[in-house]
Image (tube, coloured by chain):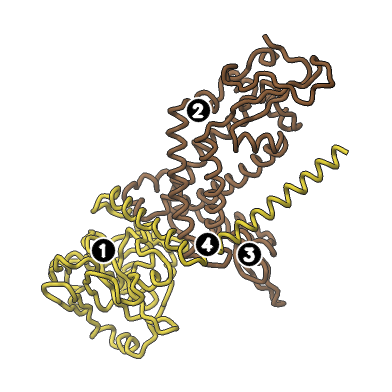
Amino acid sequence: MKIENAMKRRQFLKGTLGAASLVALAGCDNLTQSNWFPGVLNQAEKLTALVQRVITPANALAKEYTDADVSTVFPANGNTDPGTAEYAAHVESDFARWQVEIVGLVEAPTSWSLAALKELPARTQITRHDCVEGWSAIGKWTGVPLSDLMHKVQPLPTAKYAVFHCADIDDEGIAYYESMAIPDCYHPQTILAYELNGKPLDIPHGAPFRLRFERQLGYKQAKYVRRIELVESLFGIGGGKGGYWEDQGYEWYAGI
Amino acid sequence: MESLIETGSDIQPSEIDHPIHQEDASSMPLVTTPAVERVYRHALPVRIGHWLNVVWLFILIMSGLQIFNAHPALYWGDRSDRDRPLLSIRAVKSDGGQVNGITTILGYPFDTTGVLGYSNNSVRAFPAWATVPSAKWLAMGRQWHLFFAWLFVINGLLFAAYAFMSRHIARDLAPTGQDLRGIGRAVKDHLVLRHPKGDEAKRYNVLQKLAYMAVLFGLAPLIILTGLTMSPTIDTAFPWLLTIFGGRQSARTIHFIACFSFVGFILVHVSQVVLTGFFNNLRSMVTGWFVVKYEGVRHEN
């Protein structure tokens, strides 16, 4: 009798817990699909950005590794070839006519060829690339500190973001772009990289230039950079959220 | 045992609502009646914190599994050497075209079709019923995870502040020397599912104390710190995090192990709650009041 009761009770508990977790799961999915809840979840990004900005010294450097730490295979994610005829022509000519320009809210819009950029003082850094998916790879990047280019073009006080327009277009015809806050452009490790592990950047990794912005996740590291536009607001650019992945629900502040 | 005679509890008689309250005892002689005492066991801040944590942990674990599914492998060190994962959960297609879920731990493969790797005709490490949201959706999983991580941290800090200031830790949670000397007996009692009764049931036993202390001040800080170590910005602000956890990928692995330690703790915790009087335990965590039964004569002095 007592054992039977205990068994009944156990079954009841099991049933209740099972049903409760199914209801809770369905509840989570309903919230995800609702108009308002993702907006609430999104508030965490602002808090994270604020707190991380406050506790992180402006020029604190990302850890730099040694040659021995470099990944044997550095995976290439996202678009691995812009695939356009125009880009193919650039590849054909070894990017001799590729220009990268900084325009928008600047005193002196300027454009550089690959050769011109390579003549500027370079920075080499062995850093860790953290993909939003969870994996990390270590690579040795060489490029021009973006701060040097910013000093040349002199941003106007109204400029709040640097938008990186890229040459890669996805299967649906949407162009890749990214953006960062102006102060981050002056971080010593923010570079326009043209070499990976001592070799010219290859096509899967973003030839001829890609952004390295070492304090944030991989999707911020725009490849195939063609034009850097300084703007006051991200509204009206792409989907308006500040980047290709941001327009698909990823955080603009990718510090975590 | 001496403690059976003494009031082996830090709850003073003045705090007891009805010192000896008889239930269903009208027809029975007084001396053999199990006496029932109501004890105010859990203060309001503890109860609120506890139930909020139930919600936060449920969401954090399941949204964490969603994030894990985006790259279902774990590594040691700073980088992910894909040919050398400590653990991976993959779908493998056999020559016959059949798809199996294969979980590989330290090089040893296990067929986990139906749960891990391949479930419901879909290639995914953890199955839909274990993730938030249930569909494969990394961006949304991150939104859930990083929002509720804040609530978990805030809840934890408030609890820690309360527990220190109210002396909840010193009074109820920190094991005493006597507790620790009785650990062998406590382990034996637990193994045969013999649980403290009477005055002994009014306080946490030594294994309970150790488990709660380990979770509150070991596991919870560990899971938060390893989570933060995965943040490239936090790593620039506090590079020592990478040092103490052995790299970002190690931190991710420890984060995952800590997650399943929480799952293990929850399973043991809930089963103990069920075994030691489900409704009494549940009521005490809802209203604060816990009923202690005394079998036979109660020693009053």
Residues B234 and A197: in front is: B234
Residue on which disc 4 sits:
A31
Q: Are marks 3 and 1 in contact (CB under 8 Å)?
A: no
Amino acid residing under circle 3 = Gly
Local SS, label 2: helix
Q: Earlier in the sequence, mark 4 or mark 1?
A: 4
Residues B250 and A101: in front is: A101
Residue on which disc 1 sits:
A181
Amino acid residing under circle 4 = Leu
Chain drawn in yellow = A
Task: Please state which of the two labelled residues, at mark 4 or mark 3, is closer to the viewer.
Answer: 4
Badge 1 and badge 2 both on one subunit:
no
Structural distance between the alpha carbons of marks 1 and 2: 45 Å
- As drawn, the label of residue B117 is 3
The x, y position of residue B142, in whole percent, is 47, 60
Chain drawn in brown = B
Badge 2 and badge 3 both on one subunit:
yes
Badge 4 and badge 3 both on one subunit:
no
Badge 4 and badge 1 both on one subunit:
yes
Question: Does residue B279 lie above or below A166 as drawn?
Answer: above
Question: Does residue A230 lie above or below B83 as drawn?
Answer: below
- As drawn, the label of residue B169 is 2
Q: Extreme right residue here?
A: A1
Q: Please, which chain is the residue tagged with disc 2 on?
A: B
Is there any visible trace of residue A70 in the rendered image? yes
- Residue at image position (44%, 47%) is B246
